[in-house]
Amino acid sequence: MKNITSEKKTVVRSAATKEEQARNAMYAFFKSNRESMPANITTQREFILARLVAGAEVAETFVQAIAQANALVEIKPLPKFHIIQVKRSPAKAA
């Protein structure tokens, strides 16, 4: 008699299940890397979910999302301050 072993593979049966798995993966990665995330990473939520549902790797997806979030931040130069010295004339004698 032969010994037959089988391995169970996770089979995603519906788009809703895929999206739920993508959300779980996104949340788990975000939770474990929260300190390194930019404040505006939430603007990339739909991008992250779409990539994960398509089968992209979680870490690589977040790298791309962070790059896009950082590109959204407009960097403004600091204003230049000029020091103006006022020369006062000596008091007039009366």
Image: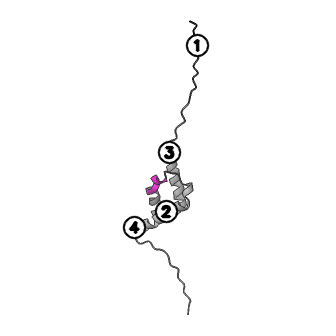
Q: Is mark 2 on a helix, strand or loop?
A: helix
Helix, strand or loop: magenta stretch: helix
Residue 50's quadrant in the figure?
Answer: bottom left
Crowding at dot 3, Cα within 10 Å, few <14 / some 14-19 / many 20+, comes out as few
Find residue 66 and name its label.
Answer: none
Query: Does residue 79 lie above or below 27 as drawn?
Result: above
Q: Residue at x 50, y 50 (%)?
A: 69
Residue numbers of the magenta segment: 38-45
Crowding at dot 4, Cα within 10 Å, few <14 / some 14-19 / many 20+, comes out as few
Question: Which residue corresponds to mark 2?
Answer: 27
Query: Does residue 51 lie above or below 7 as drawn?
Result: above
Q: Which residue is drawn at 50% across and 54% down?
A: 65
- Nearer the observer, 33 or 49: 33
Of discs 2 and 1, which sits in the foreground? 1
Question: Which residue corresponds to mark 4?
Answer: 16
What is the distance, in whole Å, between disc 2 and disc 1 at their CAs? Answer: 69 Å
